[in-house]
Amino acid sequence: MEMLPAAFASGWASGINAWGTVLVLGVLGRFAGIESIPEGFQRTDVLIVVAVLCLLELVADKIPYVDSAWDTVSTVIRPIAGAAIGAIYAGATGDLVTITLASVGGITALVSHLTKAGLRLAVNTSPEPFTNVAASAAGDVAVTGVATLVALAPVAAAVVVAVLLVLGLVALWAIANRIRRGWAALRRWRTRNDPTATGA
């Protein structure tokens, strides 16, 4: 049953970049003829919309503090996307398999999203922008690689994602103090750029 590892791995990728995940899967299904990719990802309108949203995220994700503000907004979007991808893989029939895969995708997306958001808050404490750009580019490469692996070898993708999840959680614990400083810096940034955010 390759749908479960596919939902798990694509959920992780969605937590990092939901639009990029759908775009990679859709392009591989549409142009590489990979039959395991659901047809819903391959539709022209879907590919156009996610390509535009992916481009916006690629830019926003490389600007210090803008990336963390984007992550805040995406706290709802990415887990929903992960759950939707899992449901689509199951055929979205509303049965137990659909519910299971949607849950796996959504929960995994939430964990990877929170991990990414925390790590990026820590990176934002760096005074130079290059670390932020490098971290963002690493995320782009990881999403592309994992999504491609989901299409070609779902079980291998799931193994890779399990390792990445563990490493991410360990990293969060190790740099908890920097994450707290990053959160405080983000609040100051929001206050400077949005006077209504003073009490946020």
Image (cartoon, rainbow, N blue to C red):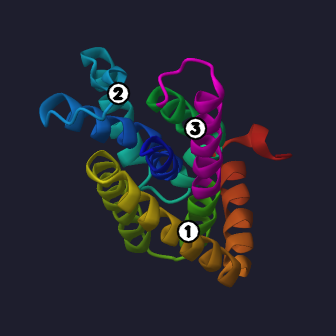
Residue type (three-letter) at the residue carrying disc 1: Asn
User: Regarding mark 3 in the picture, which secondary structure is present there?
Assistant: helix
Q: Name the residue under label 1.
A: 124
Earlier along the polypeptide chain: callout 1 or callout 2? 2
Q: Horizontal and vertical percent for residue 47?
A: 29, 25
| Number of the label disc, if any, that sits on residue 38 | 2
User: Mark 2 packing: few (<14 Cα in 10 Å), some, or many (20+)?
Assistant: some
- Residue 63's quadrant in the figure? bottom left
Looking at the image, is 131 positioned above or below residue 14? below
Circle 2: residue type: Pro
Q: In this view, does 124 lie to the left or right of 63?
A: right
Location of residue 160 (image quadrant): bottom left
Mark identifier at residue 101: 3
Pair 1/2: label in front: 2
Number of other residues with Cα within 10 Å of mark 1, as a class: few under 14, some 14 to 19, many 20 or more: many
Whole-percent x and y of residue 35? 23, 32
Q: What's the distance in space between the residues labelled 2 and 3, CA to CA? A: 14 Å
Label 1 to label 2, Cα distance in Å? 37 Å
Please check the rendered image and state whether residue 105 is part of the magenta-colored stretch, yes or no.
yes
Boundaries of the magenta span: 90-113
- SS under mark 1: loop
- Image quadrant holding the N terminus, namely top left
